[in-house]
Image (spheres, helix red, strand yellow):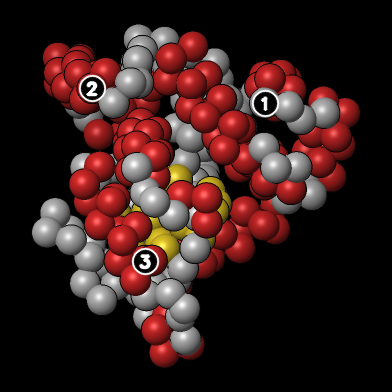
Amino acid sequence: MRIDVWSDVVCPWCWLGKARLEKALASFPQREHVEVVFRSFELDPRAPKDLDISSNELLAKKYSLGSAQIDALHERLRGTGLADGIDFRFDRARTSNTLEAHQVIHLARERGRQLAMVDRLFRAQFHEGVRVGDREQLVRLATDSGLDAAEVRSALDDQRFAAAVRDDQAQARALGVSGVPFFLVDGAVAVSGAQAVDVFRKLLEKGWERRPLTGADAAAGACDDDGCPV
């Protein structure tokens, strides 16, 4: 069974969703038969590649929020993160264009290191205050995750995985995905958002019940707090 996850590494809810899915998987009896694949979704594909401002400044400009509103939003999210083992440090977070970060995630999948790479990028972005859109920082984070620095640089120089990023985003549009994180099990059962662990457990159970799938079974469903329809 495969779970495709559309996310962006500058999306805090995507990190939460990853953590909660992993909690659900930890108690799922068929865990060893589940593959999790991260797909690309750029929240701001038009962001300049050299953009380097604090996340607070970006939120203020994009949504016309005051500092008190931003601080309150981050404080709530920080509390939520701590409950799931995530230490958000929004005072350190910088904004980035994430096109090349997504390309490195594709390379990491080819090398069997995708989940480690995604986790490293989230931690760098939201805890360490690393600007993940900076190429040299990306190379360093990739080597932290077990990739070869020379191969990472070569792949980025050639934009080897740019088409794969575009394909992921085209698939998201075809599915009607308008926000992330978005989780799709075997192309059949879906849930959007950083849902509670129990909702992810239901998603896994419904996905497993549907196996094996036929072509007619591949129409996407949706989950909510009450479960996942078949």
**Residue, x 28% and y 51% (percent of image)?**
201
What's the amino acid at mark 3?
Answer: Gly
What's the amino acid at mark 2?
Answer: Ala
C-alpha separation, residue under disc 3 versus residue under disc 2: 27 Å
Is 46 positioned to the left or the right of 26 in the image? right
Front in this rendered view, residue 37 or 159: 37
Quarter of the figure with residue 153:
top right
Q: Which residue is mark 2?
A: 83
Inspect this view and state whether residue 7 appears. yes
What SS does tag 3 mark?
helix
Residue 173: percent from left, percent from top: 44, 66
Q: Which residue is mark 3?
A: 207
Tag shown at residue 177: none
**Residue, x 61% and y 32% (percent of image)?**
117
What SS does tag 1 mark?
loop
**Residue, x 21% and y 42% (percent of image)?**
196
Quarter of the figure with residue 60:
top left
Of all residues, the one furthest to the front in this rendering is 29
